[in-house]
Image (cartoon, helix red, strand yellow):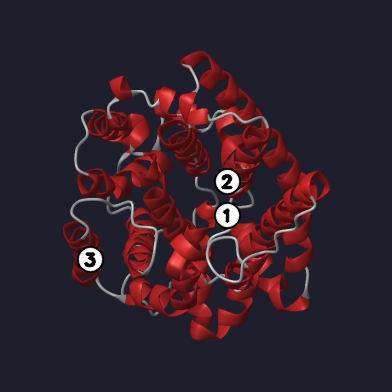
Amino acid sequence: MPGSPAASKAPNRTPKSLPGLTGLRGLAALWVVLYHYCSLYLPALDAHWLGGLLSRGYLAVDLFFLLSGFVLAHVYSDAAERKGFAFFRSFMRARVARIYPLHLFVLALFVAMAFAVRGIHYVQDGAYYPLPLTGARSLEALVANVLMLQGVQAGELSWNYPAWSISVEFAAYLMFPLVIGLLWRISGRSLFAAALAALATVWALAYVAGGDMNQWDGLTALWRCLPQFFLGCICYRVYRQGLIDARAWAGLVFVAALLMLYFDYRDIVVVTLFPLVILCAVSARGVSGRILNARPVVLLGEISCSIYLVHGLVQHATTHALNALELDQTEFSVAHSWAALALMLLTVFVVSIASYRFFEKPMRRWLNERPIAAETARASAAADPSFAAR
């Protein structure tokens, strides 16, 4: 990139694709679903013999934040270098097209379910219970979700509880057009200092939170998201300039991450390894590369946003069904829990594939064809058609 201090070190062209990351994102989505369903919802399946491999699934969100920063830097860094802050409007239009329609669609299904349940109660006992004014799944929470503000107080404002992360990530989107230009211009030493500062901010959160990175409610959720998102942007700069060649030891890094989880290393230690996991995933060859780029794993990545937003809806619907049958899933046997898990996962995958193909992709395409976003959409597709940024 002419005129940039990094120009002499950067490759002559932007890499077209990011192999491995779609699959990594799919595995992360599956990880967080299994955590919510097994460790939290079906306690008979909380496999303690797996160490932290299952019970630490909330760390998939940290991986999502890093991946999002990495991929957005891949798609938009050149545009930011050429246009500076001028591309903010088209960038935000593209980000809204990527996330917001699906978020509203799932939110609408939650609201429809709430009214359906109230209608059934009215038919059964003649009593109608209106939506509460405040609290979770209230009118206040509905407004906050429509405005994507529920992440600032997710414990009281959530309808779809996993959606807190896309709410706080919008704060990173607002800052991205300015920050990416700065990160793309600074020198090697300054880039290293920026990476250390972002990582130190994440470590400070871990210290304040007593080692628990599962911060999803309030200002600590923003504290969790922002430094990791921009650390992901820095990781892309490292990848783009070839400052670290992770191909030779990708398998070793993946095994190290799995062992850290299995032996219940502290959250912050695992999260600190995640930037290297991403660099290894995008460079992976051999067995790890074949796994990450296998068609079923890539499909998981393609529908990962739907999986992430839909699985809370499926869990909520399951709870209503069990309540109607006067059953308590916390008292299920292992066999019944496995059956419930299989049915819930099948429902998640079927609904996610359908929503991705028949709603998410068509809506994104339609919104990106609007004149304001057309240029950014074309740039995104040229950079990496399969990713288009989480």
For mark 1, does the 10 Å Cα neighbourhood hold few (<14), some (14 to 19), or many (20 or more) residues? many
Mark 2 vs 3, N-terminal side = 3
Which residue does the image show at 29% across and 32% down from the upper left? Answer: 52
Tag of residue 329: none
Three-letter code, disc 1: Asn
**In this view of the protein, which residue sits in the foreground, 163 or 227?**
163
259 left or right of 291 in image: left
Q: Earlier in the sequence, mark 1 or mark 2?
A: 1
Q: Which residue is mark 1?
A: 160
Q: Nearer the viewer, residue 212 or 282?
A: 212
Residue matched to label 2: 312
The residue mark sitting in front, 3 or 1, is 1
Q: Secondary structure at mark 1?
A: loop
In space, the residues marked 3 and 1 are separated at their CA atoms by: 28 Å
Measured in 3D between alpha carbons, the distance from the residue under mark 2 to the one under mark 3, in whole angstroms, is 30 Å
Q: Residues within 10 Å of mark 2 (few under 14, many from 20)?
A: many
As drawn, 161 above or below 377? above
At x 68% / y 41%, what residue is drawn?
A: 352
State the image quarter where residue 65 is shown.
bottom left
